Image (cartoon, helix red, strand yellow):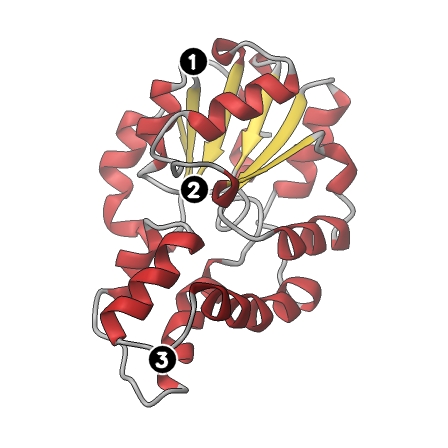
């Protein structure tokens, strides 16, 4: 079985993979709705989990008949989240050690994230790992989400690496199809938000871990 150190480039997801921040996004939309007197329906977190922010905001506006623009909704969500990224979000167990070891071995590193730039930069800089990444790619800059190959191919091109030499480290099960279409290998990382999918998800990945520390 291959090790993560057998590749020339590694592309990491941020929320739920490198950063312990999934709870922020699970809580923001329910809080946003409750602030408007709307009780969030069961299953909303899972529905939004498969969407980029540019997709989830129109969905919320449409479903709950809000008199707001997409930009207003996204702006409020980002304002709610940013303080936590700046002050309380921790890296996942083993993330710092893994990134240091990959960097020391000359493996090129990228982040591919559905997060927004200010939050992503804040948490990476806050933990002293921003300079380890030569590429950061944002889902909202792509026409299609992580279930499609675009963002993964974009990262490989920016890193100057051939897709077969890249490995993606992700907690999001739907990303697997996009990574496979890009011709890359996949490390599945357990995240409680997607615990119902773990058995199938881990079986389809090249490597599956409950903690990044297992990759060291």
- Report, in whole angstroms, how far the alpha carbon at label 1 lies from the one at label 2: 17 Å
Left or right position of 27 against 113: left
Residue 168, label in figure = none
Q: Position of residue 122 (x, y in %)?
A: 71, 56
Q: CA distance from mark 3 to mark 2?
A: 32 Å
Q: Position of residue 145 (x, y in %)?
A: 39, 39
- Ranked by sequence position, the earlier of labels 1 and 2 is 1
Q: Which residue is mark 1?
A: 1
Q: Which residue is mark 3?
A: 33
Of 67 and 106, the residue lying toward us: 67
Q: Residue at x 73, y 18 (%)?
A: 105
The residue at which mark 2 appears reads as: 210
Which is more foreground, mark 1 or mark 3? 3
- Please tell me whether residue 163 is drawn above or below residue 194 in the rendered image: above
**N-term mark: 1 or 3:** 1
Residue 76, compared with residue 146, is above or below; it is below
């Amino acid at each position: 079985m291959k090790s993560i150190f057998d590749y020339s480039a590694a592309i990491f997801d941020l929320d739920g993979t490198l950063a312990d921040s999934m709870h922020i996004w699970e809580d923001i939309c329910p809080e946003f709705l409750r602030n408007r007197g709307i009780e969030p329906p069961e299953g909303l977190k899972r529905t939004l989990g498969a969407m980029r922010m540019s997709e989830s905001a129109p969905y919320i506006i449409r479903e709950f008949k809000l008199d707001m623009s997409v930009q207003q909704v996204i702006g409020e969500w980002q304002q709610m989240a940013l303080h936590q990224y700046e002050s309380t979000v921790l890296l996942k167990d083993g993330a710092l050690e893994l990134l240091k070891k990959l960097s020391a071995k000359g493996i090129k590193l990228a982040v591919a994230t559905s997060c927004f730039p200010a939050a992503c930069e804040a948490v990476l800089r806050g933990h002293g790992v921003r300079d380890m990444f030569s590429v950061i790619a944002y889902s909202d800059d792509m026409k299609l989400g992580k279930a499609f190959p675009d963002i993964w191919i974009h990262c490989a091109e920016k890193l100057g690496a051939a897709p077969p030499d890249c490995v993606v480290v992700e907690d999001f099960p739907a990303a697997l199809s996009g990574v496979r279409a890009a011709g890359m290998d996949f490390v599945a990382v357990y995240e409680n938000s997607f615990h119902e999918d773990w058995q199938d998800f881990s079986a389809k990945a090249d490597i599956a871990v409950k903690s990044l520390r297992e990759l060291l």
